[in-house]
Amino acid sequence: GEEKDGGNGSGSGGGGGKEPTFATYLFARHRFDAPYRVLHGLEKPSIAVRPNPVPFRLPPSSSAAPAAASHPLPYRSVFAVLTLDSVLLYDTYHSRPLCVARGLHYAALNDAAWTSDGTALVVISTDGYVSVLTFEGGELGVPYVPPPKPKSKPAARASASSSASSSSSPRKGVSPLPAMSSAESSSSSSAGGSPAAAEKAKGV
């Protein structure tokens, strides 16, 4: 659930003869005032960030780890950061990359996409080739399964059905209109059907 963006984190500004370094900024959803995390140490600028569609369980030692205090989610997300020449895999729990793949292509990388089951990452380059990074079960972690939602109480269903049945049946305390006798019905029908005409017909 984080939105990510690549950018130039710091640089020499042309002085000192040092090579510039880059960083990737992670922003939490609806929190764009400050980065959620900054991933330092990139040698080339990041050009794409692609999240794995599968959430993973937190590490077993997460309750005692200091990072647990700053990680409010019950799972961690794995995502790939593409630079011009490397693929770095991070997750939302650890600050360092889980793995780094370099030298995959002759030219700059363009884009990447995860498979729907989250076990492979397809990387493309301007050299016209495609690389597929595959991961065995458990390499990225154990998939997170959310706890089942509590079922609705049967009493609520029964009350809803009883209220529905009561709405279709006649209400208590409301008596039906009295039936007209055959003489009244014939006189009212002959007098045009109105109550005033029925009274006139009775008086005749």
Image (cartoon, rainbow, N blue to C red):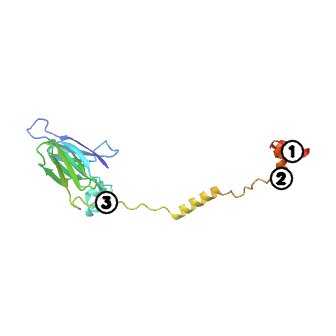
Which residue is most to the right?
204
Amino acid type assigned to the residue bearing label 3 in the image: Tyr
Residue pointed to by mark 2 = 182
Name the residue located 57 percent from the left edge and 60 percent from the top edge.
161
Mark 3–mark 2 distance (CA, rounded to whole Å): 76 Å
Is 107 left, or right, of 204 in this rendering?
A: left
Q: Indicate which disc, 3 or 2, sits on the residue closer to the N terminus.
A: 3
Instruction: Mark 2 vs mark 1: give the one in front.
Output: 2
Between marks 3 and 2 in the image, the one whose residue lies nearer the viewer: 2
Task: Please tell me which of labels 2 and 1 falls first in the chain.
Answer: 2
Residue that label 1 marks: 199
Query: Given this view, does label 1 or label 3 mark the residue nearer the observer?
Result: 1
Image position, residue 164 (x, y; %): 60, 57
Q: CA distance from mark 1 to mark 3?
A: 81 Å
Q: Which mark is residue 144?
A: 3
Q: How many marks?
A: 3
Q: Residues within 10 Å of mark 2 (few under 14, many from 20)?
A: few
Disc 1, disc 3: CB below 8 Å? Answer: no
Of 21 and 101, nearer the camera is 101
Tell me which residue sits at (83%, 46%) in the image.
188
